[in-house]
Image: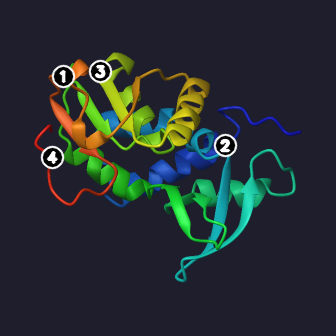
Amino acid sequence: MTVIVSDDFAELRHQMVDRLVAGGAITDPRWEAAFRAVPRHLFAPAAYHVTPGSGQVGRLLRADNPADLDAYATVVYADDAVVTQVTADGQATSSSTQPTVMAHMLEALRVDDGMRVLEVGTGTGYNAALLCARLGDDKVTSVEVDPATAAEAAGHLAEAGYRPTLVVGDGAAGHADGAPYDRIIATCAVSRIPAAW
């Protein structure tokens, strides 16, 4: 079994960040530092190859399979969403958002040092890790509705060295125990802004 450590893909991670900076997705040096610090592959140890332009999900690429390693690293450090879960008939049900989109959302959040953030939709945990890298673990609370996804995210975050407050529950209800928050970011779709937010 191949064991991947956090710095195995450091060069690819820095190249991805260089592209985000060059493309204008990251303009704040503090977010640049966060993206450089957080290894994306730790949050997607298995990823599906998706045919560009078609959205068609292909085979599963695993970080612990030496035969997959090059293709896996290319998929995880591309500026694309990374599909991490599919249904039996091949429909994507979970993914790590495209880094450009994440960078735009995080910069639009307009956080300052010391601010507290509620993230709704933990997913893989990558976005929560970026928030922790920027603000500190004690300033980040993340809510995930799916217990299995939340448990996986907790493992990914711990492996990467981040420990935000993780809550399993309905993000539409927020998390009053950690309130008040200076900012709220939703990484999932909502049909309306919940009153609790």
- Identify the image quadrant of residue 185: top left
> How many neighbours does mark 3 have within 10 angstroms: few (below 14), some (14-19), or many (20 or more)?
many
In the image, 59 versus 177, the foreground residue is: 177
Q: Who's the residue at 32% across and 40% down the image?
A: 170
Quick one: SS at disc 3? helix
| 79 relative position to 76: left or right | left
Could you tell me the amino acid type at mark 4?
A: Pro
Which numbered dot is residue 179?
Answer: 1
Element carrying mark 2: loop
**Which disc is residue 194 wearing?**
4
Q: Earlier in the sequence, mark 2 or mark 3?
A: 2
Q: Residue at x 44, y 55 (%)?
A: 97
Residue position for label 2: 9
Q: Position of residue 41 (x, y in %)?
A: 62, 44
- Within 10 angstroms of label 1, few (less than 14), some, or many (20 or more) residues? few
3D distance between C-alphas at marks 1 and 2: 37 Å
**Residue holding disc 3:** 139
Where residue 22 appears, as percent x and y from the top left, is 38, 57
